[in-house]
Structures are given as structure tokens and as C-alpha cells.
Amino acid sequence: MRSTVAALLRKELLVELRTLESVPGMSLFAVTTFVVFHFALNRSTVEGDLGAGILWVTLLFAAILGINRLFVADAEEGGFDGFLLAPVERTAMLVAKALTLLAYLVVLELVAIPAFALLLLGPPLGHALPGLIGVLALGDLGVAVIGTLVAALAVRTRARDLLGPLLGLPLFVPIVIGGARATSPLLTGAHNAAPAARWLLTLGLYDLVFGLIAYALFDFLLED
Amino acid sequence: MYGKSLRALSISTVVAMALALSLVFFYAPLEAEQGFLQKIFYVHVPLSIVALCGFVIGALLAIQHLRTRDPRWDMRSYVAIHMSLIFAVGALITGSIWAKGSWGHWWVWNEPTLVSFLIVFLLYATYQPLRFAIEDPERQARYASVFAITAGAFVPLNFIAVRLSTAYVHPRVLGSTSNLPAPMALTFVVSLLAMALLYATLCKYELTAKHTRAQVRALRRRLLGDAEEARGGRARSAAPSLPPSATIGPRTSPRTAL
């Protein structure tokens, strides 16, 4: 199982490195969205609730770009067939794809968070960074798991570009609730700001439950 | 054989509905603060409860479908979710009317139950587009079941998350029956029962209709041959349909099957 996941993950990252199909687009999208928010809100700085909302909406929509492309190569170039012919556990594909998506999200945030701090955020981010990293890690885990499940559901339908976001957004609502509420005290510039434990707990539980659901159901999506 | 208990079920639904409505209008006392408006509670809350239970039942039926691979379970799951969607529209509309009447706004964001209900509704609204976008019936059924189970698990999770996020600005009017005076509680329970019966009857009707249609198609095919049947051409649809083998056995003649 572990070697299968490692091989698949290596393949995914190699393909992404050679084609650069998803991550640069996601990052560029996020930066552009910050610019759009600046003009749409007509504000040069944001903080607190508003800042957290803008950050999470932008990250989520950028993630959806990646989710839409996650399985396209497998569906079109026969990646699914090749994988199904191999005598390996099918769950390995779920784990590898979720880790791939997680890696995409981490790179996206390495670009988007500094850009956000530079372009829009009023108070300095400095001492809130460890808390923010914790919240983002929990949120990314959930987005990666749900995104993989939704992408696998949508990829072999006729309207996949439409169905992916439609299926995904309602499922992401609890992550946005937890993520944005936990982030907003971090963006106020207060010195002892920390994310509330109950939001981290909500995010963690949600990740766990959807991890189990995806683990139980993913095999059924790969059967033909 | 499929519509056997339909008459009994329909009659009991009509009786229960009549009883519930007469209790609502003639027995239950007027609520002190909201007056007559509060009567919508006996329609709105049962509608929402039945719709949510229907979504969860749809998920359980989908689990059964993935286990047995019997298309009949998929059809039951489809009907349960389809009917719940209709009930959910009713619940959203009545909830909106109630909010307008008691708080003065058509939509209130700090009522967590209403908000989570909307999110669940938006998720389930993609169920039929998803089915419609998959052509192969076997894969359509399988993917729909995966969706139904995911969404069924999402229902309680989402309610917890949204409730956590909302500070209670309005007192929760009637969260459970425990804080209701006895006549109101009785009326509410009867209304809930009537609504559940209505749901069951409508599901039964839809299942019977689908089953009969599949039977008719199978008989036609047997009488006219595949070519004649194929000429009619089946429109692509989001609704599942049973294969002919699931409706009438291969050895029975059309006459005995009828």
C-alpha cells in the first residue's frame, strides 16, 4: 500500500512539474482575486472577519480550479484503466490523489498568504503565523479529502466542470465556517491572538469523518 | 403485487391529515405571543423533519444498493431523495413565511436550523443533475449511491457546524416537544405522523408507477420484439428504471404476469 501510494504520488507530482497545469494557474487566480476584491470592496486594507472571509473564499475557489483538473488526465489518457489493471489496492489512488491535492494547496498558500498580507491585510501577520498555519493545515486536509471524492464523482460525467463545484461547495461550507471563524481573531493585529479551540476541533472532526467516508466509498467510483 | 397496500396507505394518510388539520385549527390553543401565525409550526416543522429523515433514509437505501447491487434499492433511494427534495422546498417556503411573519424578514441568517436546511437543500439539488450527466445506467446508479451516502452523512454534520457558528439572537421557539404545553405537543405529534404517512404514501405511489412502467415496457418488448420497442426510443432521464429481468421473470408468459 505504502509503496503504491509513493509511486502514484511521484507520478502525479512529476506530471504536474512537467506540465505545470494546475498549481501556477491556482496561484495566479488567487492573486488576481485579491486584486478583484480590492476594487469590488473599494478598500485598501481589510482585517478581522472581512479579511478571513476574503482569504477563505479565495483559497476555496482557487482549490476548486485544482479539483476540477485532478482526475482529468486519468479519465482522458487512460490512467484509470492502467491503474485498475495493476494488482494494487484501489484506496491507494484516493490517498495519492488527496496528498497531491494537499501539496497543490500548500504551494498555493505559499504564494497566496504573502500576497494577501502584502496586498490587502491591514494589521501585520507576524506573530499570528503559527496559528494561521495550524488552521490552514486542518482546512487543507478537509478540502483535499472532500475535493478528491468530489473530483472522482464528477470527472466521468458529461458536465464535469459544472458538477465538481456544485457538489463541492455545499460540502465545503462547514470548513469555511470553521476556518474563517478561527482565522478572524488572527487578522486583528492583537498580540495574543490564537484560534479558538472549538473551531480547530470542528475542523479536525469534519476532516476525520469525511476521511472515513471517502475511504469507504472511493472504491465504488473506480469499478469499470 | 406492487401496489397492494396502496389503498390502505392512502386512506390512512387522508384520515391522519384530516385529524391533524382539525386538531391544528380547533384543538390547539393560540400561542400567546405569535397568535394565529404560530399554526404554521404544525406544517413547517413536520415537513422539515420528514424531509431530513427522508435524506438519511435515502443514504441507508444507497448503502443497501452498493452492498447488493440490486437496481431496486437504487430506485428506492432515488424515490426517497426525490420526495424529500419536494418536501424540502415546502419546508423552505413555509419557514420563510414564518420568518417574515414573526421577525419581519423573509430570510434570517441567525436561525441555524433554517440556514443548515438551505445548505443541505443546495447539496441535494445537485443529485439529479449528477444522475442526468451519467449515461451508463449501472454507473449512474453506483455514483448516485456514493453521492447519497456522502450527502446523508453530511446532513447531521452540517447541522452541528452551523449551530456552533450561530449565536442565539432569537430564543429557540420550539426546539423540541418537551417545552410545549400538552395540547400543542399532541397536535404536533399527530401532524408529524400525518406528514410521515403522506411521505410514505407518495413514495409508494412513485415506486408503483415506476415499477408498472418497467413492467409495461417489458411486456411490450415481449409482444412486439426488441426492434419495435427500440423504435420508440427512451428519452435519457435522471430517474432510474428497472431492467426488464427485474420486473417479470424470464419464464412467465405475459398473460400470467399480468
Image (spheres, rainbow, N blue to C red):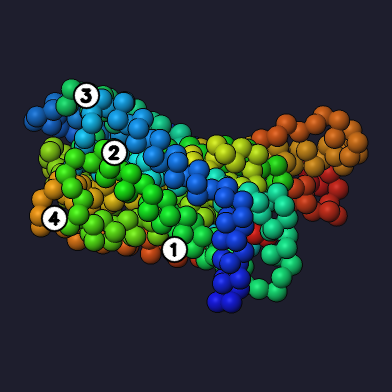
Image depth: mark 4 or mark 1 in front: 4
Q: Is the Cβ of the residue at disc 2 closer than 8 Å to that at disc 4? A: no
Asked whether the residues under marks 4 and 1 belong to the same chain, the reply is yes
Residue B227, x across and y down, in percent: 91, 36
Instruction: Tell which of A67 and A192 is nearer to you.
Output: A192
Q: Is the Cβ of the residue at disc 3 closer than 8 Å to that at disc 1? A: no
| Among the 4 quarters of the image, the one containing residue B186 | top left
Q: Is the Cβ of the residue at disc 2 closer than 8 Å to that at disc 1? A: no
Label 4: which secondary element:
loop
Q: CA distance from mark 2 to mark 1?
A: 35 Å
Q: Which residue is mark 4?
A: A193
Q: Amino acid at mark 4?
A: Ala
B214 up-or-down from B89: above or below: below
Asked whether the residues under marks 2 and 1 belong to the same chain, the reply is yes
Q: Which residue is mark 2?
A: A119
The residue furthest front is A118
Q: Residue at x 8, y 30 (%)?
A: B32
Q: Which mark is residue B105?
A: 3
Q: CA distance from mark 4 to mark 3?
A: 36 Å
Instruction: Tell which of A107 and A146 is nearer to you.
Output: A107
Q: Is the Cβ of the residue at disc 4 closer than 8 Å to that at disc 3? A: no
Asked whether the residues under marks 2 and 4 belong to the same chain, the reply is yes
Q: CA distance from mark 2 to mark 4?
A: 22 Å
Q: Which residue is mark 1?
A: A211
Q: CA distance from mark 4 to mark 1?
A: 30 Å
Residue B257, x across and y down, in percent: 78, 46
Image depth: mark 3 or mark 2 in front: 2
